[in-house]
Image (cartoon, grey):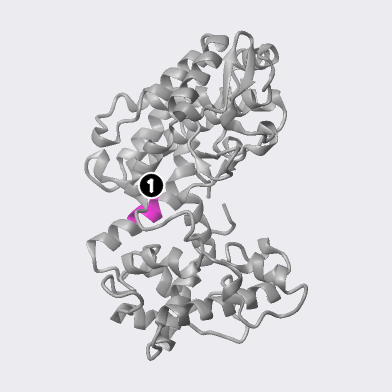
Amino acid sequence: MGTFAWVQADPSREIAVDALGLAAQADFFADLLLPEISVLTRRARYLSFFCWAAQRARKEKDRIAALRRAEGKLALAEAERHERGDECPAVVGRSRIASALKTGRPARPELLYSTTAFSQYRPLLRALGLFDRRAPAELTDDGLAVARMYTGTARPCLSEVPGREAALLRKRLGFDRRGNASESMARRAHTLETLGRRVRDLAGLSPGVALATAAKLPGGAPSDDPAWVLHCAQVWEWVSTGLKHAFSATLTRVDKSIGPLVNALEKARKARARLSFEELETAPSELDERASLAMGALRGALRLEAALRTVDLGQLALDPRPFELAKLATEDVREFVRELLRHHADAKGGDAWIELNGARIERLPAAGTKNLETGVGFHPYRLAALGQLAVDLGVAGGSS
């Protein structure tokens, strides 16, 4: 399952920020597709774990403190069970606890980290109807059913979800349409099913065939059909990824002439190579690779956006400015670089990282002292969290 990465990390603060003003459109699509899922809610078994922990803590005077102790024990068990974090990713507090284990087993592991897993997952637990929205840690009847399904062990693992528990979580999250009584759950199920089956199918087709395929899927107007939302999100992924790679290429020329950058982009423009959806996710290192991926993605975005113009998308209509930049890239690469940096300056206001001064790209104070070429990485967005949830529950075969 492909990930959507519309946000870059700020070079001075190392947090997710928007270098090119692309996040508003991305947030719009993410809210339509998965309003309850955040980039932090990546592990499905936390849902059943917290239901189980809340049931056990029902007689505690301070239920929140009891839940924190429970999640600390879980993180400790995960740290002892998995030496490498990538064996069971996104366990809150595990890295701090793993460091503490080098000097001895901590008696209160929950005190070793400040941001709790429960605070990250509570909005989703409430949105799914497992926790009462009016109480800090009160289970609903549905939450009690999930709690009974959790099979805790002496060494529980978020990656090992037993069959019946996984089936129930698939249903609650909407991966399985069978038995979903509410309209919202059925809609989420359709969204997730569409995501799993259609994103790459549409990516591999010509724009006209892709649009015809999307139009045949269940649903009414484009704004009411998750298939159309996904398709528009995919077009946005192409254009934003192309601009992201182009901007990344400019970062290799900080305090240097833009000549090699312009030459690399011009070479890629003349090559007219086409990209697949898999290649779109490549993480290039060399300037020529970045330029080639940027130009291929921007050219693909223009093809897809041209086909979308034949459809009345209503509220799904895409911001035209990135596509104007993409068109400029296929016509005049030197002017494209200038406009790309102006776009960056507009998006960041007084906090722009770089600017063009004559024929040189120069660092600005807001960038700090970080190595921009190697220190500005791409940040996974909300749909990457969905990919891990799908892996946990056996819906997808590998992580995003």
For this view, does 40 lie left or right of residue 76? Answer: left
**Observer able to see residue 92:** yes
Residue underneath mark 1: 30
Residue situated in front as seen by the camera: 130 or 293 = 130
Label total for image? 1
Position of 382 relative to 202 (above/below): below
Q: Which residues are magenta?
A: 190-194
Q: Main secondary structure of the magenta part?
A: helix
Is label 1 in a helix, a strand or a loop?
Answer: helix
Camera-side residue: 340 or 352?
Answer: 352
Image location of residue 50, percent across then percent down: 45, 76
Task: Measuring from the top left, give residue 355's x and y in whole percent.
Answer: 56, 19
Label 1 Cα crowd, 10 Å radius (few <14 / some 14-19 / many 20+): many
Q: Residue at x 61, y 80 (%)?
A: 108
In the figure, 78 relative to 370: above or below?
below
The disc labelled 1 sits on which kind of residue?
A: Ala
Residue ID at (66%, 65%): 95
The part of the image, by quadrant, that contains residue 90 is bottom right
Q: Position of residue 252 (x, y in %)?
A: 68, 25
* Residue 192, magenta (yes or no): yes
